[in-house]
Image: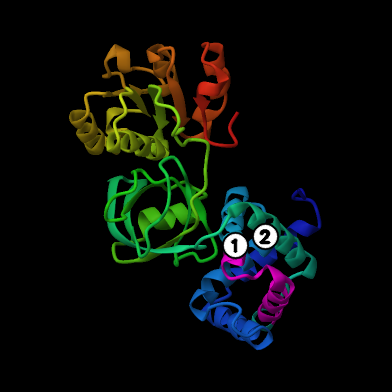
Amino acid sequence: MPTPTDDACPARVNLAAAWATVDERAAGDFWCTLEDRRPGLLPQRDAALFFTALGRLVVDDDDAANRAALLVVLGRAYRRFNLLPHATAIGDALVATVARHRPEALRTVAVESATNAIRRAAARVGDGPAWWHVQVIGHDRPSPDIAILTVRPWRRLPYQPGQAVPVCTPRLPGSWRWLSPANAPRADGTVELHVRAVPAGSVSHRLVHEVRPGELLWLGPPANTGLSLDAARADDLLLVAGGTGLAPLRALVEQVAAAPDGRRVTLVVGARRFTDLYDSISLDKLQCAHDWLTIVPAFSDDAGAAPAERGDALTIALDLHQPGQDVYVCGPPAMLAGARRRMRAAGIPAARIHLPEGFD
């Protein structure tokens, strides 16, 4: 990857800034250009979402998480609309459209590189819808920097607890971020998303501080993260959560609750202080409803905590670990760094350790 001193970096930054000013008229122009060259190739209703995702992939490849989400979304879209045989024509239409709306022309080589990446992604993502329209029906703020969004898809979202989905808001089209639903699939199709606003997170900032009930979001295809339960096993579980890493682990608890199979579950929830336990009401309801579930708080910076609850989540979890448990850990990078090493040192077999993909 180029360093800040490389000649390519200023051009990329300038182009990304220019792309941010491309408005909805350009998306309509893109569809008309493509329709003239390849009639009926892309539904007009999906043109704006497709255009913004493709353009963002081309101009901004420094954000690994956004790029991975874009490739999942676009790979599925190219399969869904049978666009792979026409990938070159689509790239040409993108270049022509941006050239008309901004003086900075997209580099053909960048478009070709993005197209090749999409082809590879399309071979992996399988078939099905590329995105789901969802409506925000609830937006709760349990703390200043966290929001719990309840959304209802227009079509049922086929995901499994522990998976993650790309999320995009029309307030920042073309930028997608991974979030993991906090509930098992419900009868009404609703999905609960837990979002923490981070300083450099433009999408998370909008989801937490700007989005309101009634607005629409887009969700991309669900993807495995390494946190799903093995349907062929029913071993006891030790779940270790930090921050909004609680979301996918709470979904696993709900999955067990929907079809009890005799396993026992211990959920350790880490926070700095008691007031930082943002989802405590839902956790209390779960614990009261299920005698096989034990929830243990872990406070890293709370002098008033009971001795057994004082410490970081992983340390307390290791003290509670019992042979035969499968261990799932999800939380901020600082918590995950070195987690596998610590668990292996504590004698937990590698096959029983489950972390989000990318953390060793």
Which quadrant is the C terminus positioned in?
A: top right
Q: Is residue 333 left or right of residue 315?
A: right
> What residue would you read off at disc 2?
118
Q: Which residues are magenta?
A: 77-99
> Looking at numbered disc 1 in the image, what kind of residue is underneath it?
Leu
Task: Label the magenta part by its dominant secondary structure.
Answer: helix
Residue 119 point in image, percent of width and height: 70, 60
Residue 277 point in image, percent of width and height: 30, 33
Please say if 185 is above or below 133.
above
- Identify which residue is drawn at 55% across, 22% down: 351
> What residue would you read off at disc 1?
74
Crowding near the residue tagged with mark 2, few <14, some 14–19, many ≥20 C-alpha atoms within 10 Å: many
Magenta segment: does it hold 94? Answer: yes
Indicate the quadrant where residue 184 lies: top left
Q: CA distance from mark 2 to mark 1?
A: 6 Å
- Identify which residue is drawn at 36% across, 39% down: 251
Residue 317 point in image, percent of width and height: 40, 18
Residue 84 point in image, percent of width and height: 68, 67
Q: Residue furthest left?
A: 288
Q: Secondary structure at mark 1?
A: helix
Magenta segment: does it hold 78? Answer: yes
Check contact, mark 2 vs mark 1: CB within 8 A. yes
> Looking at numbered disc 2 in the image, what kind of residue is underneath it?
Ile
- The chosen color scheme is rainbow
Please say if 94 is above or below 345.
below
Q: Residue furthest bottom?
A: 36
- Identify which residue is drawn at 58% across, 58% down: 70
Label disc, if present, on residue 242 of the rendered structure? none
Q: Earlier in the sequence, mark 2 or mark 1?
A: 1
